[in-house]
Amino acid sequence: MVDISNIKNIAVVGAGVMGYGIAQVALMAGYDVTLVDVKENIVNNGLAKIKEGLKKAQIKGKLEEGVPISNIMSRCITSIDLSSAVKESDFVFEAIVEKLDVKKQVCNLVMENSPPHCIFASNTSTFRITDIAKDSNKPENVIGMHFFLPVVLQCCVEVMKGEKTTDNALDIGVEIGKRLSCLKGKRFSVRIEKESPGFIANRLLMPPIIYLSWIFDIAFEKGIPWEQIDADAEARKLIPMGPCELTDYLGVDTTYNVLKSYEKMFSPDFAPGKVLTDLVLKGYLGRKSGRGFHDWTTGKPKINLNIKAGILNPEMTMAIMLNEGCKLLEDGIVSGYKIIDDVMLAGASMPGPFGPGKRNYEKWSKMLEDFVEISDKKYLKPCNLMKSGGFIKMRR
Ligand code: NAI
C-alpha cells in the first residue's frame, strides 16, 4: 500500500513539450524532480524551458513570494541514464514518443530499477495501459495519466487504470494529479474507473478526424485552399481553430500516428486519408516544422474568415463527439455525461457535446446517418443511446 505522503521524488521520462511541462508543474508543487531523456542537449533544452516557464509564472504572481527561481530549479536534476535516474523515484511520469514498444521498454526498465512502491504513470494518447504494463514486473503499479498541452495552462489530467492496476495506485495518481500546479487554477484530476484507450478527451476528439480527413481529401480534389476550410469552421465558433490550423498546431504527424493507432484498435475508418499521409511523407508536420497545411515560418497563419469553402459543417464534429460520448456511456467508461463535458472544457478548452446535444440529438443522428450513407464510414453510425436521447437521463 503506497501512502501519498511518501511520494517526494518524481522522475519525468521524456523532456519534450509534455515532459518539461509536467516537470515544471511538479516542481511548482514542491516535488524533487529528475528529468530524463536520451541526449544531454534534449534534457538541457527541457531544463531551459522549465526555467522560462517559471519566469512567466513568477511574472503572473503564481510562485510563492520571495522564493527565487534558482531555489525551485535546485530541486530539478537531469539524467540520460534511466536505470540510475529512477533508483530513488517514488513516482515516474512517462512522456516519451508515442510508440508502444518504446513505452513498454521504458516501463520495464523503470519498474526493474525503481523502489517496489514506485508508480509508473504513462501520458500515452492512445495505448492501453494494460499493454504498456504487460511485461513489467509490477503491472499493478502502472497507471495512465493524460495531460493536455500546454501542461501549465490546461488544468485537466485524466487518470486511468490498466487491467492489473490496484485501486491504491489509481488513488495515488488521482491525488498527485490534484496536487500538481496549474496556472489557471486548481488542477482537475479525473478518475476513470474502466480502461479506455484515448481516455475521455481523445476518444471524443479523434472520431471527428475521420470526417475532417474525408473533407481534406475532397477539398484537395476540388482544389479548395486550406484557409477556406478553416474559415468554414471558424465562422461557427464551435471549435477554437479551423481544422487545418489545429492539425498544424498539434503536429500533423501526431494526428497521423494517433489515427494509425485508432485504425488498429477501433476501426479501419480511422486510416489517415491521402492529404494527411502526403503531408507526413513530405515532412510538412505543421507548426514545429514551419510548414503543414499552412506556412508557420513567420508565426501563426493569418486566416481570412470571409472566404468560405462551404463544404465543412462544424456541427458534424459536435454530432460525432456526442455519438462517441454516448458510446463511452454505453460501455460504462463513465457513468454520467457531466464528467465528459467537464473534461472537454478543462482539457481541450472547448464545450462538450452534451449541452447542445440535448436539443439536437435527433437532427445530429440524422446528419450522421446521411454522412455514413455517402462516405461509408460506418464507425460514425449513431449509437442507440444517442438516437434515443437516453443519455439525457444520465447527467451526474
Ligand atoms: P516530444 O516529441 O516533444 O517529446 C518526446 C521526448 O521523448 C523526446 O524528447 C525524445 O527524445 C524522448 N524520448 C524518446 N524515447 C525515449 C526514451 N527511451 N527514454 C527517454 N526519453 C525518450 O513528444 P510530446 O508531444 O511531449 O509527447 C510525449 C507523450 O505525450 C506522447 O506519448 C504523446 O502522445 C503524449 N501527449 C502529447 C500531447 C501533445 O499535445 N503533444 C498531449 C497529451 C499527451
Image: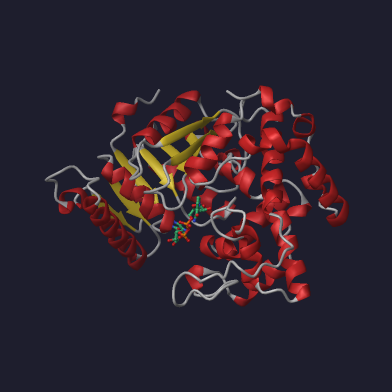
Residue at the far right in the pictured view: 373
Quarter of the image that includes the C terminus: top right
**Residue pictured at 61% horizontal, 29% vertical:** 334
Q: Is residue 313 left or right of residue 9?
A: right
- Visual colour scheme: secondary structure
Image quadrant of residue 240?
Answer: bottom right
Whether residue 320 is visible here, answered yes or no, is: yes
Residue 250: where, in percent of width, then height?
A: 53, 60
**Residue pictured at 22% horizontal, 51% vertical:** 58
Q: Is residue 71 left or right of residue 127?
A: left
**Residue pictured at 46% horizontal, 45% vertical:** 147
Residue at the far front in the pictured view: 306
Nearest to the observer: residue 129 or residue 315: 315
- Where is 40 relative to 71, above or below? below
Quarter of the image that includes the N terminus: top left
Whether residue 88 is visible here, answered yes or no, is: no
Residue 164: where, in percent of width, then height?
A: 57, 30
Residue 2: where, in percent of width, then height?
A: 38, 26
Residue 231: where, in percent of width, then height?
A: 62, 64
Nearest to the observer: residue 348 or residue 101: 348
